[in-house]
Image (spheres, rainbow, N blue to C red):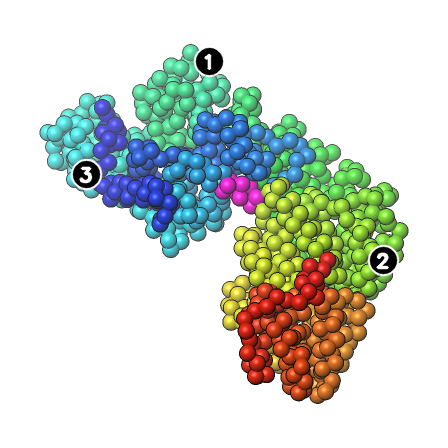
Amino acid sequence: MDGRDRLEKHLYEREDEVTAAQYAVEQICAGAGDGEGKRGGLLFFSAAAGLGKTTVLGEVRRIAAARGCTVLSARGSEQEHTVPFHVVRQLLQPVLAACSEAERREIFGGWYEIAGPAVGLFAQQNGSAVPDPQGVRDGLDWVVTQVAVRRAPVVIVLDDAHWGDLESLAWLAAFAVRARELPVLVVLGYRPDEVPAEAQTFRELIDGRSARPIRLHALSPEAVGELVRSSLGAGADDLFCRECWVVTGGNPYEAVELIARAQDRGLAPDAESVPLLRELGASARGTGLVKRLESLGPAAVRLAWAAAVLGTEISPELAAAVAGLPPAEAQSALDQLRVARILTGTRTLEFIHPLIATAVYQAIPPATRTAMHGQAAWAVADAGLGITAAARHLLETHPEGDPETVRQLRAAARENLRLGAPDAARRCLERALREPPAPKDRAGVLYELGCSALLTAPATTVNHLTAALEQPSLDSALREDVTFRLAQAFAHNDQLANAAAVAEAEAARTESPRARLRLQAAHYLWLVFDAHEAQAPVRSARLAQLAEQLSGTGIEERALLCLRTWDAMLRGEPAADTLAVAARSLGLSYTDPEWGFELPSMTALSYMYADECDRAEELFTSAIAECERVGWGGAHLSFGFTLLGLVWYRRGMLGKAEDCAREGVRLAERVGPRVPAQWYAVGLLLDVLLTRGRVEEALRVAETYDFAPPYPNAVVFPDTQTVCGRLLLARGLRKEAEAQLTAAGKRLEAKGILNPTWCPWAGHLAVAVADEDPGRARALAAEMLRRAEHYGTPTAIGEALAFSAAVAEDGDALPLRERAVEVLSGSPNQHAYAEALIDLGAELRRAGHPDRVAELLSEGVELADRCGADLLAERGRAEWAKAGLRLHGQRTVVQRGVRAAGHG
């Protein structure tokens, strides 16, 4: 038994670490057994190179296996950190390989097509929908959760996490937070100073307050002395032992290697051997290690270099091919490297320690290293290990203008996109561009590069796509695609006017009728969403004229009809006319790779604003299912829940609306701060909370998510500035509310957005100025009512009547409230109807007409309770008390209200 074996058998001065591991494993086992209390947890070991993380994690695996845990183990690799999901595959492939195909499909459930490629079960076919990274991470969450349920408890062990690929680390950082809810223990070992800056979420995990990593320290002189004596004999001299500690600094790896070198040299552990220890210690690292390797001969050096280039899980045959060695010579060199404790393993090779792998790799002459990566790329491809595994070697080669290298890198980029790894795709395409591609292929590479960075770096995408348009070899079909994506990139970069302009210019240039319609749709799309559009009425007229000629037979026509439907609704054109156009626009997919979520959502929302809430709910429910089915789990899914919440809000079902809004906020948080999805979700949540009377909570939410100026340049609903005005009004800051609401109205009117049910800024402004300028308040409310009557839906008219009554002169409010109740009885908005009932009951009480007060208040309070409108219900009960009545429990809402609640 050599020194290394002894160290692994006896963990010197690691009692605290082992105790922590035993406790964590016991906790996870106890939690999995009783199903209550603490279930999962996190255990982090942080240390510099050579301090024993790998040995400690090996002990964790042993303890967990001995307790019957399912152990999922992986190790980061310095050379393979650019291979997406490399760590995930190490964790999951062994346990999945033991399952039948039917069992694997059961474990994956509906996530098989989305997460299966990332795990390496199969390759996505060309033409398959590209999942977004968040959807893939959600799928991996599901898979590991199912493994945990079936094989609890589960211990996930990741060594050298600082070298993990970014895609795996992003997943693990998010999943680790959930591990506490599952019978899962996540154990990480990493070098704190080498965690990449790009792994932001992972750094937040290990640096967070709850992380509390256990830091491994160097061994004491006493521990090194004990190690020396256990290997070289109990009679080892104290001075010799002390010098071993001095030479190695107490680093366990270096101490073990030093003792092993002393054994190989046959040194006596006494004072006479002390002068030789420093030279021996140097041979375990850096240049000393390189000299020791070179002493083994050229074949051993080449094989070690090849292994360092290949990274981890090294096939001996593959290493021999990269080294250019015949089988017999490669075997002899491998035997030498094993004896020298540089490599270990038989069927799969690995370096004795990552420090050795790093030293060997850095010792390869740069030109040779580059050439060996090129050889490795072809060897990996020939071995059938996949294009992405080969591509990571091509990234390290020098550009040579090789068309085959460009082809392989483009193929790897497409594969990475299908895995849900757009950043890895971008790296491949950036390298392909440097090769460089042939002139005829350059525009295509620029286009693909732009598409890969569309969501993560839209400004960079603009540069790439603009360059693609300047290529002389650009054909008309690719030019159309490049322009379409360039418009999207401008829009994602908050340059909506540029987006509309570039699409308009190409639409005028193209000779293809289909391309013209497609680009016209893009042009109008970004104009419609540009909050600062200068000539909205002109654009609306042109769009209406174009839509009249379309039947909705193709995707491009439906896209334009969706835009016309939305524009007509915003302008407050009669709802019946709007729905006639909407019927011709149906049929677009919510996950269309070109048009995405926005266009079909416009049609669904137009049904909602036209009081066809059943139809809108049906469309958004199918949209959420479609997004989940193809793995769109980020902004798209957030929009889906937010817009479904908006439907519930329009129904007046405030509890369900709040649930959906909070889910939209949660999903948007995973995308980033102040992104469009967050403005939508937070805006809806604030509207709901204010309507429920929870002002303080609304203010906290607004502060948490920085819901304040500067407002986005894109049209957002609920309108951000109007919601801020409502917040100010709820705080009693009428002057400040007046300023915000006046500015909102001016902006929306300039944009041609006149539909009061889409944004009731005028009603809130009327309330804000009623005390100081009642004439202005009544004029605002009257114009709101006129527009609502033109649009023609019960909800729009009823809400406008309520605002008019709120600012009416004495004696004028009662007929307005009577009419509001009558109109809103046909509205799907139960909250608006409940409020109208309570307001009318209060008005009758104040006017001295008590005959119907009891019935109105009773019905209004019961309906408010059903809506989750706590403040409104409380106000209704207060009115009941003022009327001198007693509320004898709840009764069934009259049939009129029930019928309205299901109105579609």
Secondary structure of the residue carrying tag 1 is: loop
Front residue of 225 and 288: 225
Give, as a three-letter code, the residue at label 1. Answer: Pro
The tag earlier along the polypeptide, 2 or 1, is 1
Crowd rating for badge 2 (residues with CA inside 10 Å; few <14, some 14–19, many 20+): some
Magenta stretch: give its range.
Answer: 132-142
Cα–Cα gap, marks 3 and 1: 45 Å
Give, as a three-letter code, the residue at label 2. Answer: Ala
Secondary structure of the residue carrying tag 2 is: helix
Which quadrant does the N terminus fall into? top left
Residue corresponding to mark 1: 326
User: Mark 3–mark 2 contact, CB under 8 Å?
Assistant: no
Crowd rating for badge 3 (residues with CA inside 10 Å; few <14, some 14–19, many 20+): some
Residue corresponding to mark 2: 544
- Discs 2/1, front: 2
Q: Which mark is residue 216?
A: none
- Discs 3/2, front: 2
Q: Quadrant of residue 825?
A: bottom right
Q: Position of residue 295 (x, y in %)?
A: 34, 21
Residue corresponding to mark 3: 223
The tag earlier along the polypeptide, 3 or 2, is 3
Q: Position of residue 86 (x, y in %)?
A: 49, 34
- Discs 3/1, front: 3
Q: Residue at x 72, y 39 (%)?
A: 443
Asked if residue 183 can be seen in this view, the reply is yes
Majority secondary structure in the magenta region? helix
Q: Position of residue 788 (x, y in %)?
A: 77, 70
- Magenta region includes residue 509: no
Cα–Cα gap, marks 2 and 1: 74 Å
Front residue of 358 and 371: 358
Cα–Cα gap, marks 3 and 2: 84 Å
Residue 90, placed above or below residue 552: above
